[in-house]
Image (cartoon, grey):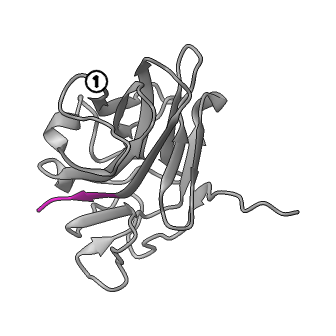
Amino acid sequence: MSRDLGILEITTINANRAAGEPVAESKLVITHRQMDPKADAGLSYSNSKIKLNSWEGTCGIEMDREGVIHLKTGTGEWWGAALELMGSGENMAGFAEGYLNLDIKGSSKASFEVGFQTGTYAGGDQVNNGVRFGDKGPYKVLDRWLSYRIPMTDLVQGGDLKDVTSMIYFRGLGNFDGKGLEVRNVFYSRD
């Protein structure tokens, strides 16, 4: 009996942009069911592979063949996961006035942070640039898909947009229940 394992790495890249070179296109696609950078010159993929990483095994994360990211939130003292670049950081300086776009739904009642990371933990310069999802504030999770267009100005917490190392991260803040979240159609825009 074989089991269809989830995708743990996004291998579609833009090999025409060198590490450190600014993203020139108006949209940077992480995972999207309908956006195809091969068919639209205004779209791009990242310049290196992206790994789905559960931080120290504190939660579950995988992606299905439709590009939907499935998270099982943690129940311990903390939990987190990210879609991390496997090469150098992405230069997204041109997106300072842009947006992080995503669809989200789930059964979890946990409060958590969603955003992007700059720098590296090992280098001592990692910064979480995110907003709170949960019972308080404008960002909610329901059992149906909700679409969000989050301004980068709300996300940036002092991180260097020339060195984005995690394209999206999820970090538990409270009410940990081990239930599921689904995220799809993740992209950055500057329109």
Q: Residue furthest top?
A: 77
Task: Give the quarter of the figure containing the N terminus.
Answer: bottom right
Task: Give the quarter of the figure containing the C terminus.
Answer: bottom left
Image side of residue 123 versus residue 97, left or right:
right
Q: Amino acid at mark 1?
A: Asp
- In the displayed structure, 133 sits above or below 15; it is above
Q: Residue at x 45, y 32 (%)?
A: 108
Query: Is residue 76 inside the magenta stretch?
Result: no
- In the displayed structure, 90 sits above or below 54; it is below
Q: Which of 142 and 123 lies nearest the eye of the viewer?
A: 142
Q: Residue at x 59, y 58 (%)?
A: 9
Q: Quadrant of residue 76?
A: top right
Task: Label the magenta part by its dominant secondary structure.
Answer: strand
Q: Residue at x 26, y 81 (%)?
A: 41
Q: Which residues are magenta?
A: 186-191
Q: How many marks?
A: 1
Q: Secondary structure at mark 1?
A: loop
**Percent position of residue 24, x then y:** 23, 68
**Percent position of residue 114, x then y:** 35, 36
Q: Which residue is mark 1?
A: 135
Q: Residue furthest front?
A: 143
**Percent position of residue 178, x then y:** 56, 28
Q: Quadrant of residue 127?
A: top left
- Crowd around label 1: few <14 · some 14–19 · many ≥20 (10 Å): some
Query: Is residue 189 inside the magenta stretch?
Result: yes
Q: Residue at x 40, y 36 (%)?
A: 119
Q: Residue furthest bottom?
A: 39
